[in-house]
Structures are given as C-alpha cells and as structure tokens.
Amino acid sequence: MVKRMDNVLIVVDDLAAAIAFFVALGLELEGQTTVEGASVDQLVGLDGVRADIAVVRTPDGHGRVELTTFHTPKAISAEPRNAPANTLGMGRIMFAVEDIEDVLARLRTHGAELVGELVRYGDSYRLCYVRGPEGIIVGLAEQLDER
C-alpha cells in the first residue's frame, strides 16, 4: 500500500539554475549533496555514478522535487529537446500558486517562457504552462475566489 509520494526527479545540466528557478517559484531548498558508490550504481543501474543532487520542497512540506546533475556517466538528452505537451512520458509538474502573474514575472527572470497562454478555466482557475531550465514544463494554477 502506498503511503505517500515522496518526490519527483528531474535530471538537469545546470543544478544552480534549476535550484534558482524552483526557489523563484516559491519552493524552499531542503538540502544538497553528492552521491556515488556501489549502492548508487546498483540503485540506478549505471556504473561509476557521481552526481550532485538538491531537494526543493513546497512551503507546506508535502511536495518535493529532486534535481540531479550527473557528472559520470554524463546525462543524455531526450529528443525532441523542447517537446510539445502531447509527448509521451512525464509532461509537467503542476503547482497551486497565489498571484499567478507575480509568479510568472519571477520565473521569467530565470528564463521561463509561456508554452501557450495564461487562460481562465471557467470560474475555477487561471492556468498556464511555462518552460523552464532544461525544457522542464511547469504548470501553474491559481484558484479563483468563490464570490
């Protein structure tokens, strides 16, 4: 029986830029370390792993994203680099936010670009997708007041 989801892993080339992006989004840096050795190799099914990892968490402490930069073996790129929203596999991570336009402005200072448009979904939400470092797609959802 599953107790909870602990984290989502994203492999990146520029760990500092990815951390800065997620901190600008509003996540908090929980910690950083380097991992290597036989147990890491066995876990991920690769030989000679040496990687730097950072964990960022949502302010409520329930959601975490693990960011990893592989020094050895070098990371490989998925194709296409900036895949569209209908590409098979994990497409995006969605975050509930307050003041979506402020969040967008902060993320743009870290190179984020809208994938489509900021839209209103009925009377419930304002939503958008942004593409950040390494082509990561992050969904933003601002719940509208029920007035």
Image (cartoon, rainbow, N blue to C red):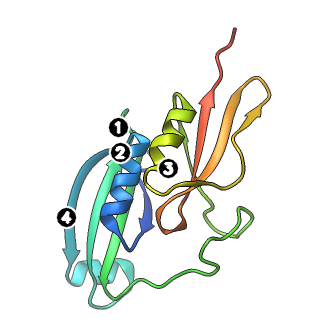
Which mark is first along the chain, 3 or 4?
Answer: 4
Task: Tell me the amino acid under the disc marked 2.
Answer: Arg
Label 4 and label 3: CA atoms lie apart by 28 Å
Within 10 angstroms of label 1, few (less than 14), some, or many (20 or more) residues? few
Which mark is first along the chain, 2 or 3?
Answer: 2
**Circles 1, 2 touching at the beta carbon (< 8 Å):** yes
- Tag in front: 4 or 3: 3
The residue at the point 75 percent across, 64 percent down is: 86
Which mark is first along the chain, 1 or 3?
Answer: 1
Label number found at residue 61:
1
Is 111 above or below relative to 94? below
Label number found at residue 33:
4
Residue 34 appears in which quarter of the rendering?
bottom left
Task: Tell me the amino acid under the disc marked 4.
Answer: Thr
Report which residue position mark 2 lands on: 57
Is 46 above or below relative to 28? below
Within 10 angstroms of label 4, few (less than 14), some, or many (20 or more) residues? few
Task: Tell me the amino acid under the disc marked 1.
Answer: Gly
Label 1 and label 2: CA atoms lie apart by 6 Å
* Left/right of residue 38 with respect to residue 3 in the rendered view: left
**Circles 3, 1 touching at the beta carbon (< 8 Å):** no
Label number found at residue 69:
none
* Left/right of residue 138 with respect to residue 59 in the rendered view: right
- Tag in front: 3 or 1: 3
Q: Is residue 1 visible?
A: no
Which mark is first along the chain, 1 or 4?
Answer: 4
Label 4 and label 2: CA atoms lie apart by 15 Å
Residue lying at the far top in this picture: please name it.
Answer: 147
Residue 45 in picture, x, y percent from top left: 39, 84
Residue 50 in picture, x, y percent from top left: 24, 81
* Left/right of residue 4 with respect to residue 92 in the rendered view: left
Report which residue position mark 3 lands on: 108
